[in-house]
Image: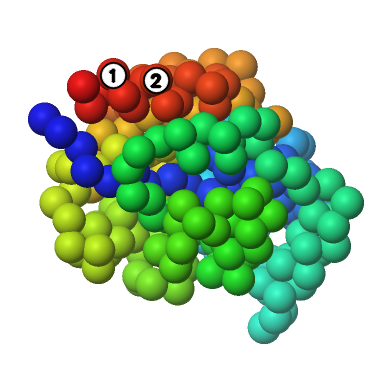
Amino acid sequence: MKFSYFFSDCDGVIIDSEIIAANVMVKYINDFGVEIDLDTYLRTCSGKTFSGIMTNLSKEHGLVLSDNYLDEITSLYMEAAKTQEKAIEGAKKAFEEIELPKAIISNGFKAQINHAVDLVGLRNEFEDRVFSGVEDVENPKPAPDIYLFAAKKIGIDPKEIIVIEDSKSGAKAAVDAGMYVIGFTGASHILEGHEQVLNDVGVKHVIQNMSELPPLIKKING
């Protein structure tokens, strides 16, 4: 079957930002008196929304969250990102070599996604095809809703789409949407054994370096 579109996650795929968010969240959660270390956070929370993580912790530990807690977390993240964020090595070159139209699908807010796209220099590849699991649909990843929404908005059969994802929740969302999913394990937050985690969710291939992506897609679509 020929694939006609390429969907990409944002954090941990084009921009090495998941580790920044994880460090910010670990400190934020610890400040409530809830013990969680970086390794545990990455294994259990990576790829999920800040609101989903904090809502679950609030129920589990009886935390009282302020009305603007999401703004607090976002501000802490943006401050840390000023000095720490960077593009995934080779992402720009790899994406420019992929001869398919592209859209970016993330659980982040559109302002953050657009910032990442521009930082990496991929605006010409994605143009305005930016979709947010917390703004465009009611249920973010790991639900398939945002992937299905983007496919419908573009007007393409989900079965004609190749996706690249780094997180378990993101990969599950794309797999459950009926798309052909490639896992990526080259970001700073990836733990040992994550390749198997992605395989268990149902991804078709796992790559560690972006240089592997264009020839793999060419082979898949050959």
Q: Is residue 159 visible?
A: yes
**Image quadrant occupied by the N terminus:** top left
Q: Residue at x 69, y 42 (%)?
A: 87
Say what secondary structure mark 1 lies in. helix
Name which residue type carries label 2.
Answer: Pro
Identify the amino acid type marked 1. Lys
Asked if residue 100 is positioned above or below residue 219 in the image, the reply reads below
Q: CA distance from mark 2 to mark 1?
A: 6 Å
Residue 101 in picture, x, y percent from top left: 33, 49
In the displayed structure, 30 sits above or below 196; it is below
Query: From where the camera sits, is residue 54 visible?
Result: no
Q: Position of residue 89 (x, y in %)?
A: 67, 31
| Disc 2: CA contacts within 10 A as few (<14), some (14-19) or many (>=20) | few
Q: Name the residue at the bottom extreme.
A: 67
Q: How is the image coloured?
A: rainbow
Residue assigned mark 2: 215
Residue with the most extreme left position: 1
User: Where residue 111 sits: x, y (%)?
Assistant: 60, 71
Residue located at (44% from left, 68% from top): 128
